[in-house]
Amino acid sequence: MTVTLLPGAPVPTTLAAAPAFDLEAVLASIDTMAAQKPVAAQIVSIANSDDTDARTLAQTLASDVALAGRVMKLANSAYFGMRGRVTSLQFAVTVVGFTTVRTMATVALTDLDDESRLPADFWRMSTCVALGASTLAPRFGERPQDALCLGLLAPLGVALLHHNDSDGYAELAAAEPTAVGLRAAEVRRYGIHAFRLTAVALEQWGFPPSMVTPLSAVDDLAGVDGALLRVALELAARLTVEDHVPVPVEELTSGQLREDAVPPVLDKVRAEADELRLAMLGE
Amino acid sequence: MSATMASAEPLVPPEIVSSIFYGAAVSDTLVLLVAEMVGGTPRITWGNEGATQLLGYGLADLRSLPVASLVPTLRGGEVKLLLRRERSARMNLPVRTASGALVETVVLCVPTPSGRMWTLRLVPVDSESERALRATADAHEQRFATLTERSPVPTLLSEQGMRLAHVNDAFCSLVGLQSEQLLGTGWMSTVHPDDLDGVIEQVVAVLGGGDGETKARLVRTDGTERTTVIRFSHLFTPGVGAGFVGTIEDITDRLAFEARLEHQANHDPLTGLPNRTLLAEHVAERFRPGTSGLAVLFLDLDNFKVVNDSLGHAAGDELLVEVAARLRATVRPGDLVARFGGDEFVVVCEGVDQDDAVTLAERIGAALAEPVRLGGVDVRPYASVGVTVQTAEHGAAEELVRDCDIAMYQAKAGGKGRITVLDQRARAEARDKLRLVAELRQAIERREITLLYQPIFSTADGTPVAVESLARWHHPTRGAISPGVFVALAEESGLIGPLGLLVLDETCRQLAEWDRLLGTSAPGQANVNVSALQLDPNLHGSVVAALERHGLHPTRLSIEITESALMKDPASAREVLMQLRDLGVSLAIDDFGTGYSSLAYLRHLPVDCLKVDRSFVAELAEGHAEIASAVIALARSLDLKTVAEGVETEEQAAQLTALGAGFLQGFDLAQPMTGHRTTAWYAAHAR
């Protein structure tokens, strides 16, 4: 393995010894979280059902005041363009869409809304991935709203790994400047990379294959399934990671997206990211 | 199976267990596998009939197959994501069959309490019917996409709130942007800021279910605006949420056309100025009874007819266009300039007093007086301007414009190129005149106009041979009104026709009555005065009707027409006179010598008599008999009779008789009398 060190970064003599990392325990911890936040768990389980209606979802959501507040705030954010016209929770659910409500419930369920327990810049990164994916979704034949949710939840695995091995994960991340290198290092240390871990969790909760498959296929450069997520991650890195060495988007998308289409997307993402982050965190 | 059930019924009879196992083992629709840890590696240890069919392995080959080779996408240690120790797992996984092919399945994995053995149930996700359903759904989606994409109707598709998931080419070209710039909330920036709220309101309503539409301006990239009607329909995607389909109708051209039509209806095509209709609306909108500050200027171009007649209508039009431009340039912003008709213009100003209005009128006069070159000639378009400022007396908007019209006529009457303000006195006079006209109309209708009769004498034997009918109006409050005033008023206000008919009919009636009362002593003939305005083809019919009504012979009537009336349109006057002459009615020219009649015409007119004007008779007393003598001589040479009017002394009577006048009429001989008095007078005279 080639370890590229950032200038000025402390030179690690060796990586911290791999902990007795128990994937089973990590997955089990998700169940524990669900037990602690029953309303969010209930929303996660019902929101994907085809016969779900806005009224039922809003009724359930109303039991979790903090989560309901975030959904209202998001529905009135510039992202949805409703300019404060959303005054009922049921209408808010309609505006943001069921998948988004479910995504927000998942965020609450997994404590992603507690920034103190997350890697630095976690939300800045994930909102950029989300907006990048949503903006580019039509080019890849995907639904923008699903892409937004995928982008928001994709780094869930990162949070879980960080949560269970914060020092080790921070060191690992600092030592691997490229996305591909980081994922390889994650597999070496934990037996699974962060996005795969997200996929497992989402699959466990019954999220549709359209959201799970791209996470599993993120390393398959020749495949189309992970292309949108790959390019969204690349754009987010360009916006949030200092000294990021850009990877040409043609390489990431098998030529489906050209580099000259990127600047306007970056502008849009940069403009909307903050508001989306604040709405997601309920600040 | 839940633990509670197990504790409630701890013993499932062995035959039931074996029956269920048998059913599961031979099922070809259920795919079941059992995995165990064998030597630290999870391996398949059992499979049912369905499993051997789906995977293509013989039961022997299936046994001891590593789980990892069955689910190749779970690389490295990921198999344990499926084979969990304490809880079941569910994963979408491709499963490798004996032939190496991959089958997409949902794998449901349940651990045994020992944590060393798992039951795997495989459910292929790509069943025939699912594939068919998806293909149908895809075809529907494709059809819809093609329909909207190719549609010339600009179309929006939102799957979430205001966020667009799709726009078609027609919408992109309507606003001049690429679809990438419009998707999401990008399209909202194309809606005019003042209209965006209305659009959002509609979307809010439509997302809740139902349809709606709103008018909104869309701003194109080049800055131009298109006015559109956006129609929204509710769109629900199961499991996703509510959105809308929006179709856009560009009504810019239609509105422009309607606006053009409306403009044409309210504007003068030549000058582009508002016309009379718009002027009336404009004044009515601003008129508040009892307030002040509204002023109206009424302009009439002096000598416009001269320009039209001498330089042609094109030059006249050019002059009107130039005047319109100068007016627009001279008035204050917000003042209205309208073309009232012909060469008349009206300016309406707000928030001004009389001095301001007069100053504006002077400024307009000065601006108009600059020469205009028309057909090589410099023309100075002077105008007469009437000014009216609203007062408490103005009860309605029309009164303001009408007063202004009066002021303009007063300005014109006072000499052209003037400005006249319709002040309190002038307004009162004008109103008084209007009132008098109404009273005259009433007087005619009620036959309150009475007739006096003045005898006319023959110089041959001094006998009265005829009478002249003289109309009189005794006003109930104003007293006697001079015929000079009320006849002129009748001519101005269109009442001369009814007045003339009244005189004609009453005269005939009186003649018939005299015949009845006096027999052969009754006056032989009555002279009736006819105005120039009555000299039309209807006159003959009216005369015939009056004669018939009262059973009189036409020779009993003589029609007197003034010299100036005859000269207005000699050709048509001659036509009318010929008809009357053929009827047998006598014709006399009144006030002869005071006008400018051509003697050549006189020879061709079918008249019987000339009346020597009273002014020439009066001159006799001053020793000037020249004109009276010439008129009498002229009549004799044309074989016409003569009546000398205004004979006030015996000397005049003698002198006129000596000059050869055939008939005399005057105060000295007999005063005008009522019909009744005339009857008595004739009766006495006969004795």
Image (cartoon, coloured by chain):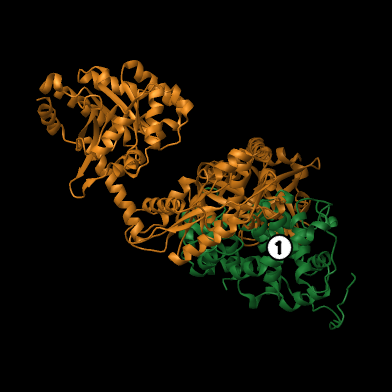
Chain colours: A green, B orange
Q: Is residue A92 left or right of residue A140?
A: left
- Res B37 visible: no
CA neighbours of label 1 inside 10 A, class few (<14), some (14 to 19), many (20+): some
Point 38% across, 50% down: residue: B398
Examine the rendered structure and indicate whether residue B606 appears above or below residue A43.
Answer: above
Residue situated in front as seen by the camera: A110 or B630: B630
Point 34% across, 60% down: residue: B424
Residue situated in front as seen by the camera: A172 or B433: B433
Write down the chain letter for disc 1. A
Residue B74 sits in which quadrant? bottom right
Task: Give the x, y percent position of residue B101.
Answer: 79, 42
Residue situated in front as seen by the camera: A14 or B108: A14
Name the residue furthest right: A2
The image shows a total of numbered marks equal to: 1
Residue B49 sits in which quadrant? top right
Q: Is residue B101 left or right of residue B425?
A: right
Residue A168 sits in which quadrant? bottom right
Task: Give the x, y percent position of residue B616.
Answer: 35, 39
Examine the rendered structure and indicate whether residue B420 appears above or below residue B444.
Answer: below
Residue situated in front as seen by the camera: B558 or A37: B558
Task: Give the x, y percent position of residue A188.
Answer: 81, 67
SS class, disc 1: helix
- Res B469 visible: yes
Point 66% across, 65% down: residue: A272
| Quarter of the picture holding the C terminus of chain B | top left
**Mark 1 highlights which residue?**
A268
Give the amino acid type for the residue marked by disc 1 in the picture.
Lys
Task: Give the x, y percent position of residue A74.
Answer: 57, 64
